[in-house]
Amino acid sequence: MTSFKAFWVEKNDDDVQHSVIERSVDDLPEGEVLIKVRYSSLNYKDALSSKGMPGVTRNYPHTPGIDAAGVVVESSNTAFSEGDEVIVIGFDLGMNTPGGYGEYIRVPAGWITALPAGMTLRESMIIGTAGLTAALCFDKLVRMGARPEDGPVVVTGATGGVGSVAVALLASQGFEVVASTGKADKHDYLKSLGASLVIDREQLGTGNPRPLLGEDYGHGVDTVGGDTLSNVIKSLRHSGSVAICGLVSSPAFSTTVLPFILRNVNVLGVDSVELAIEEKNRAWAHLASDWKVPGLEDMVVETDLDGLSAEVDRIFAGGVTGRTLVVL
Ligand code: NDP
């Protein structure tokens, strides 16, 4: 019987406690592939699960971690063999299936991406769900026809995980990037990732009753929702698109039809969780080759399982910049 360390969240009514405990692989759910986890990462959703907030995890106690990268230990599916390096992102991992904050996970083969050539396990988890989502936003914009000559792409929540990777990826692909942030002391960080202009979060975050605003942006990547998203939509140039993936400010937004019928604006939804594994594999293959994100090591903070609880608190205090890598 193999025992392993896992981050453990217990919830009793409103009381949520964190600890690191010993578990056995026999405690893991049935599944085709047993993986020894080397790295995970901390995403906004992991913080929600770790705090017992509604909408992510139904049953506690629980081990969160929607991302995991590691090595196959046992597989009953011929698609994977012992020793394969693999990535697992999304589906139910870390939601109601014990996740990447344990040293072992057991999952269906259909959730697994073989680590693409040209990428390390460490790089895959610096990217993680947040970075994959940024890449999916980029992909949707490009599939919709976005080109650098359309004008600047605004990225909101820019110092966050999705935002940081979006800024770096878009800039490396030749797009001019305007980064919107609430962190006055992180302008140099965003410029180092490739932003050509950094604006204060309030500039887009304040509600405006006008149905259309100045055509400041060619396209957008929005992680914030609420008034910020409404203002991005109203500020897009003709035929501009905004890829929407997040809701850190609000899940609601309001707009008239005018940006759509007068400016031909497109709103593109992005979901990294239930996206078909073939689409995930395709994005990972790009991230390992022609979409290689520069500066990954400049956006990472590391923690181990013992430090996770404090990192979760930092997310809710708005203190996180870039990506948090969990080293197991
Ligand atoms: P992070 O916590 O890493 O970053 C969020 C950033 O948003 C912060 O760094 C901050 O950036 C900004 N922010 C925080 N609070 C507010 C606020 N009240 N108003 C405006 N801006 C705020 O989160 P992630 O980047 O991992 O995720 C971002 C969003 O995307 C989340 O809502 C998450 O749930 C969602 N998401 C969706 C996915 C999908 O598949 N659709 C996958 C991954 C994430 P700054 O200080 O620079 O303004």
Image (cartoon, rainbow, N blue to C red):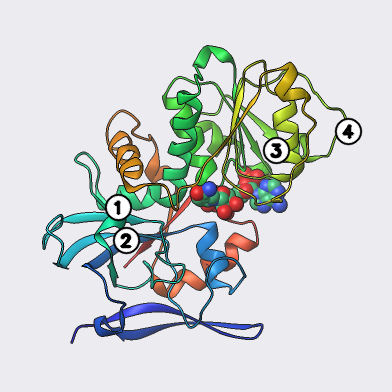
Residue 152: name its quadrant.
Answer: top right
Residue positioned 57% across, 14% down in the render: 150
Residue 322 appears in view: no
As drawn, is 126 to the left or to the right of 161? left
Q: Are marks 4 and 1 in contact (CB under 8 Å)?
A: no
Q: Are marks 3 and 2 in contact (CB under 8 Å)?
A: no
Residue 248: x and y, percent? 65, 52
The residue that disc 1 covers is: 122
Residue positioned 45% across, 48% down in the render: 272
Residue 269: x and y, percent? 56, 39
User: Mark on residue 209?
Assistant: 4
Q: Amino acid at mark 1?
A: Arg
The residue that disc 2 covers is: 39
The residues bearing labels 3 and 4 have C-alpha atoms spaced at a distance of 13 Å
Front-most of 281 and 205? 281
Q: Earlier in the sequence, mark 3 or mark 2?
A: 2
Residue 279 appears in view: yes
The residues bearing labels 4 and 1 have C-alpha atoms spaced at a distance of 46 Å
Tell me the crowding category of disc 3: few under 14, some 14 to 19, or many 20 or more residues within 10 angstroms, Cα based.
Answer: many
Looking at the figure, which quarter contains the N terminus? Answer: bottom left
Q: Amino acid at mark 3?
A: Leu
Of badges 4 and 1, nearer the viewer stands: 4
The residues bearing labels 3 and 2 have C-alpha atoms spaced at a distance of 33 Å
**Helix or strand or loop: what does disc 1 sit on?**
helix
Q: Are marks 4 and 2 in contact (CB under 8 Å)?
A: no
Q: Earlier in the sequence, mark 3 or mark 1?
A: 1
